[in-house]
Image: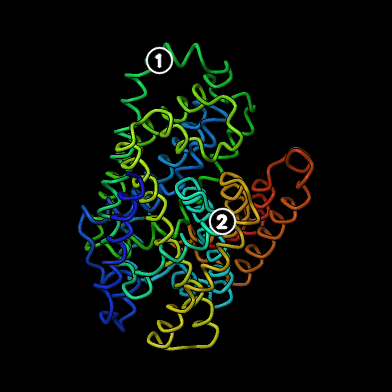
Amino acid sequence: MTWLATGIYAAFLLLMVLRLMGRASGEAADYIVAGRTLTLPAFTASLVTTWYGGILGIGEYTWRFGVSNWLVFGVPYYLYAIIFAVFLARRARRSEALTIPDLLERRYGRPAALLGAGTLFVMTAPAAYVLMLGVMIGVITGLPLWVGVFVGTGLSVGYVFRGGLRAVVATDMVQFVLMFLAFLVLVPVCVVRWGGWSYLVTHLPESHLTWDGGLGAQAIVVWYFIAMATLVEPAFYQRCYAARTAGTARRGIGAAVVLWIIFDFLTTTAGLYARALLPDLADPVQAFPLLAQKALPPYLQAVFTVGLLATIMSTIDSYALIGAVTLGRDVIGRWRGLTEGGSLRVVRWALLGTAAVSVTLALLSGSVVALWKALGSVGTPVLLLPLIAAHSAWRMPGRAVVLSMVLSGGVSLAWLVLGRGGGGPWLGVEPIFPGLGVSVAILLPQMARKA
């Protein structure tokens, strides 16, 4: 039954590829931001699915640390998404830019744009999601992880090559329904079969029902800084650039937050059941797939499996596109001074480079959460203050911005490397904090002087 459902879903993706054959646009605005035509439903569904591809990482974290998942991967991201909607969404849409590096070049010059593009490429390469897809394919087929990673990546970027953002949004509309359907099937079945809150209380470790999951305050608080990456999130900017109007962008993010809250309730609950029912799980990344095998009859397992695949692939295709645009247009195209048409040709082939980087990072890291944390800790200090200032009346010299980007990213990366293998962050301080400190020390005096 699972094979049949998966085959139908794969056929749908193949149909999308065939429909787009020969329809590739030579216009950058059409390929990168769908001609700036996204309506509110399309904007919302696409943003919801794109930003929630880390579904197996949510299962992994909840299995390990319980309800603290909501305080780590829920609340801080709602907070910054709302801040983005209120303060940045309209400005982003009205800028008429195509990408974040466009905005950086306008305000700070080409070196800042190139540094920003390089940082964004590393941050957006969908390695964590490729890893999850490889795990899912392995669960379904029994294939080794590396085979699942290669196969899944190929399936996820095929239709993007021809159709760009239009193809991503078209598939997202279907994947949005599938991702909610998966957990609307799983959670009620668990409640009916094993009982509700009282069952969880008696079958979970005590730490799983505490606010910090037994990790301590810093382990939770650091995510409120890592979640600042939302304010430099290229998927948010791309969708805002693609929205029909500035109002569509703001309302769409607000609607997405409401839907994320609902979905987080479902996924956190499912993760708690996974821990209660599968206490000896060897690989927590597989918490959700293995819970479905234990809880659901075959036909519902098939529905759930396709829903998980859709959730993950809806993020891979979007970030693969962003990564390809960043590498092909914003790095190579900007470096070589290519026209928009010439850059767009490079973008399509840059999908291969994005896929290769994603596969490599996925196979080198066994933890989805570790990838999120590492990339967010290094990339956020580089981009946060320059992008906030770019939307304000502050005027900062390009040299100061470039210096901040280089040193803040370098310090965070060095801190991350020094802490590897030590059982915790170097000197007990998470890498994002010294990086942000360097950025603030360099740019805050400039912002005060130019305000």
Q: Identify whether 318 is placed above or below 344.
A: above
Q: Identify whether 339 is placed above or below 359.
A: below
> Which residue is labeled 2 in the image?
448
Q: Residue at x 53, y 18 (%)?
A: 204
First along the sequence among labels 1 and 2: 1
- The amino acid type found where label 2 is placed reads Ala
Q: Position of residue 147 (x, y in %)?
A: 54, 59
In the rendered structure, find residue 19 and report the number of the disc placed on it: none
> Which residue is labeled 1 in the image?
197
How many residues crowd around disc 1 within 10 Å: few (fewer than 14), some, or many (20 or more)?
few
Q: Nearer the viewer, residue 447 or 302?
A: 302
Locate residue 192 relative to residue 344 in the image: left or right. Answer: left
Label 2: element kind: helix
Q: Position of residue 264 (x, y in %)?
A: 39, 35
Instruction: Classify residue 301 by image quadrant.
Output: top left
Q: Identify whether 136 is placed above or below 301.
A: below
Q: Residue at x 52, y 39 (%)?
A: 286
Q: Nearer the viewer, residue 318 or 153?
A: 153
Q: Position of residue 160 (x, y in %)?
A: 36, 69
Locate residue 35 relative to residue 411 in the image: left or right. Answer: left
Q: Nearer the viewer, residue 157 or 124?
A: 157
Label 1: element kind: helix
Q: Nearer the viewer, mark 1 or mark 2?
A: 1
Q: Which quadrant would the N terminus be assigned to in this image?
A: top left
- The amino acid type found where label 1 is placed reads Trp
